[in-house]
Image (cartoon, rainbow, N blue to C red):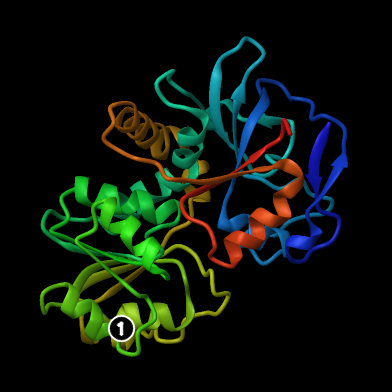
Amino acid sequence: MRAILITEFGGPEVLTVADVPAPEPGSGQHLIQVARAGVNYGDTHQAEDSYLAKATLPLVPGAEVAGRLAGGRRVVALLEHGGYAERAVADPRLTFDVPDSVDDRAALALVLQGTTAWHLLRTSARLAAGESVVVHAAAGGVGSLAVQLARRFGAGRVIATASTADKRRLALDLGADVAIDPHPASFVEAVTEANRGRRVDVVLEMTGGGVTDASLAALAPFGRLVFYGMASRTPPTAVHPVELMRRSRGVIGFWLAHCMADPDRFLRGPMTELLELVAGGELRPVVGGTYPLGEAARAHADLRARRSVGKLLLDPTV
């Protein structure tokens, strides 16, 4: 079968099409005929072996697929790897039925990035009604859903950050109260002004470096920064226990892999809720583009260069 095969670690250039043996499902596993594969920012880290979980070569990347089982059931599934291919093997506990009213693209936007947004707000930040929320990268796969979910979960004010005027307009269209540039000279002042003169309660942050440091400084007493990625590949420097105590602030890490270890507890409920919201027209997944399987490198390059919005997909049928 056709798949993207990584034989050496590096940038987008290491993603090449190859003919590889089709995966054989083990006892109880599902074999999925892949209609679409999802592309995530974590995949770019996996390709260069800078992700939290170390990779082993050769590697077929890809953590999520949508397609059909042998009996015709439409499903979406989370994987450890192997999604950038015509067929993939999945654990039934990490496989979810897709209702007819939800297309494959929307299902893929939900299964990893949607559940991440849900847990960032519900589990990690423990968002309370009326609290203010800053969503960084608000036009991205997680951010575009987090903006909408924050509003639905009762946030008093949703402040989006995005790198271009078009992305900021999209964030406003999705329900943000204010959308600002994430890199002004005085980020704390900009966020405080956007929050009507008050520091903020929650920040969802996945950039790293100075953006994390400035976001931490923008928190009000008892504010929480949830750190779930490091797109800049630059670690933050300002997280010190004494400084956290000085303003009663908290920094919380989140990695969806821990939810995948106990899917019945952490994934099935959120996925059911998210699919119902999409089916009812109450949640809008943003799909930014679909690339042929052979153009996976271009998808990674666009993602790393911030040229994309929403969910990126690969089509293994072309």
Q: Does residue 124 appear in the picture of this structure?
A: no
Label 1: which residue? 187
* Rendered view: 312 above or below 225: above
Q: Does residue 131 appear in the picture of this structure?
A: yes
Q: Position of residue 16 (x, y in %)?
A: 82, 51
Q: Residue at x 26, y 84 (%)?
A: 188
Q: Position of residue 112 (x, y in %)?
A: 49, 44
Q: Quadrant of residue 206?
A: bottom left
* Rendered view: 286 above or below 156: above
Q: Position of residue 227 (x, y in %)?
A: 41, 67
Looking at the rendered structure, the kind of residue marked 1 is Phe
Q: Residue at x 15, y 50 (%)?
A: 154
- Farthest residue in the top direction? 71
Q: Position of residue 201 (x, y in %)?
A: 20, 68
Q: Secondary structure at mark 1?
A: helix
Quadrant for the N terminus, please: top right
Q: Quadrant of residue 275?
A: top left
Q: Residues within 10 Å of mark 1 (few under 14, many from 20)?
A: some
Q: Residue at x 11, y 58 (%)?
A: 130
Quadrant for the C terminus, please: top right
